[in-house]
Image (cartoon, helix red, strand yellow):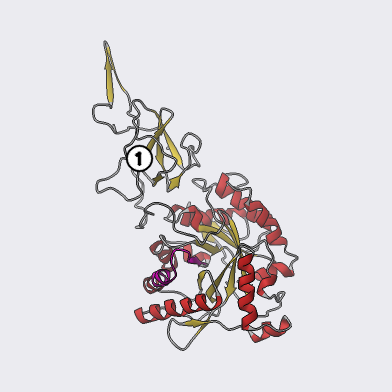
């Protein structure tokens, strides 16, 4: 974020002893045993088998309350393994904790999935944010975009990220100060008024988080002591101002080990209501081994959402690894967004980050209708370009923009187009 831009089944293993084959007089034929009956309340992860309406199904990724009979197909969460016989009702529902022996799968995974800890029951708390929501950054500075007091943020935004916290002389520690230039531009703005505005946004059902970093951010968490200082200082800001969480927007690099330590410490101080977001640049989410991507995977159990900045990027490889996609179109958004979706993050932890106008970024702007098309492609498999993702992700979280101020400058065209479309997603 910049201050100036920012597969029919080959062989199925019998799941019940003695139930894999039934022999008839004069003619022997093998019948596939039904797996445990699907339960709407159970959580399934990749490779788990469940049966419904006389068919076996295998989960492709984390899912709950998505009927296999309805949500199966090339682009859906369940793979239909065909007709089965002798279904049984499980005594206990499947769990998301992998068993000590290899669980039954219909097809071995072609690659080793990222090492992450699946959720034990439900996804972590996300601070009561909607299933699909809109995020915008509020500028605590005046750079030619419409200067705004926080309470003047349009109601279309569900999550407002205050940009930015300031570094201190203590490594890892941050503080917050209202920018004098902004205060002058809005006719005066005090710390007390800013705090009152956060309370006002809360009364409207909105969430407000403090963003750390940005293009010019110099916060560095590279040691255990810096991790402690970060957690302590952000916790102080949360208590003093009423922030609902923190956004990590460190565009000049980060140490995933110590930042993860800091965020876990902060979570322990605040509790499950803490919102944790990340706004990596496109290059930062190309490879699960890169520092930003690794951080997201390392804190997956407490992470709310990652809204990658799909702009100021140039050409990048998509999840198909077949070609470099140029920025500024639906193919770029969908081909790049499916990388974290296919490499460990849940759909509800992925959102699309775009600039709200051509003036908000140096490149990569797309019309808000293109953002909507990309969300449709990822969530429903419709309105795609020439690139089609390998699955659909109905839980895709939503969209983010840099910035609210630039959108207001542009007549709120971005939020007024994207926000109502979120309600049409599954």
Residue 158 locus on image (x, y percent): 61, 62
| Residue 367 found in image quarter | bottom right
Residue 261 locus on image (x, y percent): 37, 72
Residue 372 locus on image (x, y percent): 64, 53
In the image, farthest residue toward the bottom: 169
**Label 1 packing within 10 angstroms: few (<14), some (14-19), many (20+):** few
Q: Which residues are magenta?
A: 263-278
Residue at 51% across / 57% down in the picture?
350
Q: Is residue 399 above or below residue 28?
A: below
Image quarter hosting the N terminus: bottom right
Q: How many marks?
A: 1
Residue 340 locus on image (x, y percent): 47, 57
Looking at the image, can residue 344 be seen? Answer: yes
Which residue, given by chain and number where applicable, does mark 1 sit on?
Answer: 107
Residue at 70% across / 76% down in the picture?
147
Magenta segment includes 271: yes
Say which element carries label 1.
loop
In the image, farthest residue toward the right: 411
| Residue 353 found in image quarter | bottom right
Q: As rendered, which of 125 and 107 lies closer to the eye?
A: 125
Q: Is residue 86 above or below residue 201?
A: above
Residue at 33% across / 36% down in the picture?
90
Q: As rendered, which of 110 and 211 lies closer to the eye?
A: 211
Q: As rendered, which of 389 and 204 lies closer to the eye?
A: 204
Residue at 38% across / 46% down in the picture?
46
Looking at the image, can residue 5 be seen? Answer: no
Magenta segment includes 175: no
In the image, farthest residue toward the top: 26
């Amino acid at each position: 974020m910049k201050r100036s831009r920012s597969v029919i089944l080959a062989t199925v293993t019998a799941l019940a002893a003695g139930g894999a084959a039934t022999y008839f007089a004069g003619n022997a034929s093998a019948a596939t045993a039904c797996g445990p009956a699907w339960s709407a309340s159970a959580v399934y992860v990749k490779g788990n088998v469940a049966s419904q309406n006389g068919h076996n199904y295998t989960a492709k990724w984390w899912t709950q309350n998505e009927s296999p009979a309805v949500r199966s197909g090339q682009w859906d969460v369940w793979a239909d393994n065909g007709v089965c016989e002798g279904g049984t009702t499980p005594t206990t529902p499947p769990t998301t904790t992998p068993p000590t022996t290899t669980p039954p799968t219909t097809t071995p995974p072609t690659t080793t999935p990222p090492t992450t800890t699946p959720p034990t029951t439900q996804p972590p708390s996300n601070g009561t944010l909607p299933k699909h929501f809109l995020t915008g950054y509020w500028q605590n500075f005046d750079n030619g975009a419409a200067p705004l007091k926080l309470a003047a943020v349009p109601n279309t935004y569900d999550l407002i990220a205050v940009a930015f916290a300031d570094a201190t002389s203590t490594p890892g520690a941050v503080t917050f100060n209202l920018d004098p230039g902004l205060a002058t531009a809005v006719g005066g703005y005090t710390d007390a008024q800013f705090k009152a505005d956060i309370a006002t946004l809360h009364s409207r059902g909105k969430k407000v988080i403090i963003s750390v970093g940005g293009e010019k951010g110099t916060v560095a968490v590279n040691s255990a002591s810096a991790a402690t200082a970060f957690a302590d200082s952000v916790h102080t800001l949360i208590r003093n101002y009423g922030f609902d969480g923190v956004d990590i927007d460190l565009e000049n690099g980060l140490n995933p080990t110590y930042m993860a330590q800091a965020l876990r410490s902060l979570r322990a101080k605040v509790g499950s209501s803490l919102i944790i977001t990340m706004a990596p640049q496109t290059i930062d989410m190309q490879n699960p081994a890169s520092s930003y991507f690794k951080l997201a995977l390392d804190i997956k159990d407490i992470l709310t959402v990652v809204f990658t900045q799909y702009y100021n990027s140039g050409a990048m490889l998509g999840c198909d690894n077949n070609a470099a996609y140029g920025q500024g179109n639906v193919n770029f958004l969908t081909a790049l967004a499916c990388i974290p979706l296919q490499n460990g993050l849940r759909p509800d932890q992925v959102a699309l980050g775009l600039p709200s106008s051509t003036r908000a970024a140096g490149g990569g702007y797309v019309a808000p209708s293109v953002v909507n098309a990309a969300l449709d492609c990822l969530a429903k498999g419709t309105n795609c370009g020439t690139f089609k993702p390998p699955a659909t992700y109905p839980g895709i979280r939503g969209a983010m923009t840099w910035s609210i101020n630039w959108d207001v400058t542009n007549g709120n065209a971005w939020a007024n187009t994207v926000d109502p479309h979120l309600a049409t997603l599954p």
